Image (tube, coloured by chain):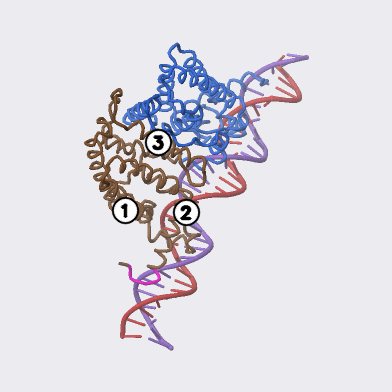
Chain colours: A brown, B blue, C purple, D red
DNA sequence: AGTGAAGTGGAAGGGGTATTCCGTTTCCGT
DNA sequence: ACGGAAACGGAATACCCCTTCCACTTCACT
């Protein structure tokens, strides 16, 4: 990989600092703040990660792998409805604990291929989970696996690290959503947006400053 | 109010420009952009609205009044459940059509008293609506009127002007939420956050850079 | 230990926004 | 129509952030 041991060490310091800072304050935090926390100069950050997106990918790859792992575990749950419930609970917990990863979960980074590969792996397992939960008669038939980003967006707007009230609210929202997903005698849902268009709308470039 | 006719006219131009710009791009847009669209100098904007929050209040007071009016109309609906459904549909439609007002709906501005008075008026009517809908046996008994901000936050994260896919997604999310609100045989909800703490968490000061 | 390349930190440059200041213009009462 | 006060626009100032550059330091190989 890299040639010199100290360079490799600094790179790791930057990533660890980014995990902290992005987790607390989100992925738009000044690079200089990352550098300060890592105890290195700004140039060292820039040299290792010329574009912010590269640092984001490196920083959240582990979290995205955990996400994919959680999806796989849910899909493997002997009780698929239990798996579904647990997975949504996991999501809002993670979103509430890590501001940066909350943003990453609701934003597509077409250039960050390893990150997107993990996201897709999670989606594939989620699709399996949905199929099993529907087959078990617990999940409503018109639920779409592509409602996952919809739910992620919904909960992402609520929770935020540091606010216990919002964490409670997030759990309550998940309970509402789970209730809404139960199979039963109910009106059919309005149409889902086209998956392609939906994911396009979540691409990084089209996300204006934050707010 | 103001002394000179031209000053009054310019002030109105600024507010109308702000309605346009805030609606499209959100309330964090540069003041210089507002001035440019209004066709006045930056100083004129600053003189009339020394703080951004003042311009926000003036700009969205009318929309907040409409919001309160819609809540009152919903509360007066002969069929309260129909009123409830219609109100949620109205909300997501407004949020998707006006980025700035979407932010205003999910942010408290303790200093903007007229704005907050309208918001509270709307909440009072919503409380009436909720009472009637529960009495009619259509709305689940453990729904709290203070779930309104929770739902507003949820939908606010989804819709965005200019994206048809997200508008469709927003309507679908509302359908899920409505289904979740129906009375019926269901597990009780987890506790709601304390209303005071919830509203505190949504105060303007604690909202970091939007993103 | 010496040497050259790799790596480093901070300063300088460039773009953008909020805020202040001031010479000029516009209004309005007389 | 005129004069003073109010209001105006834009330039100047002050930050903040990203990016580039370069003189200096540190490493690793011999």
- Left or right, A169 with respect to A62, comes to right
Q: Which chain is disc 2 placed on?
A: A
The quadrant holding residue D21 is: bottom left
Q: Nearer the viewer, mark 2 or mark 3?
A: 3
Q: Earlier in the sequence, mark 2 or mark 3?
A: 2
The circle on residue A65 is 1
Residue B48: % across, % down: 62, 29
The residue at the point 40 percent across, 36 percent down is: A175
The circle on residue A21 is 2
Q: Which residues are magenta?
A: A2-7
Rate crowding at label 1 as few (under 14), some (14 to 19) or many (20 or more) other CA atoms within 10 Å: some
Residue A16: % across, % down: 43, 60
Residue B159: % across, % down: 39, 31
| Frontmost residue, A2 versus B147 | B147
- Left or right, A152 with respect to B200, comes to left
Q: Nearer the viewer, mark 3 or mark 1?
A: 3
Q: Earlier in the sequence, mark 2 or mark 1?
A: 2
Residue B137 magenta-highlighted: no
Q: Is residue B49 above or below residue D15?
A: above
Residue located beneath label 3 in the image: A175
- SS at circle 2: helix
- SS at circle 1: helix
Distance from Cα at disc 3 to Cα at disc 1: 25 Å
| Frontmost residue, A51 versus A5 | A5
Q: Is residue A79 above or below residue B147?
A: below
The circle on residue B53 is none
- SS at circle 3: helix
């Amino acid at each position: 990989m890299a040639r010199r041991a100290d360079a490799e060490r600094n790179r790791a310091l930057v990533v660890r600092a980014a995990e902290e800072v992005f987790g607390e304050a989100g992925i738009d935090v000044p690079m200089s703040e990352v550098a300060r926390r890592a105890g290195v100069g700004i140039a060292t950050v820039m040299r290792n990660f010329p574009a912010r997106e590269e640092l984001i990918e490196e920083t959240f790859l582990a979290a995205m792998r955990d996400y994919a792992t959680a999806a796989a575990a849910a899909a493997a749950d002997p009780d698929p409805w239990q798996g579904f419930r647990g997975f949504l609970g996991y999501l809002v917990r993670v979103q509430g604990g890590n501001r940066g990863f909350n943003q990453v979960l609701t934003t597509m980074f077409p250039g960050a291929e390893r990150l997107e590969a993990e996201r897709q792996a999670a989606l594939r397992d989620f699709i399996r989970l949905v199929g099993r939960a529907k087959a078990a008669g617990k999940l409503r038939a018109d639920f779409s696996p592509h409602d996952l980003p919809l739910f992620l967006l919904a909960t992402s707007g609520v929770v935020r690290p540091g606010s216990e009230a919002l964490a409670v609210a997030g759990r309550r929202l998940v309970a509402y959503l789970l209730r809404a997903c139960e199979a039963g005698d109910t009106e059919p849902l309005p149409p889902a947006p086209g998956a392609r268009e939906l994911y396009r709308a979540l691409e990084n470039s089209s996300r204006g400053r934050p707010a």
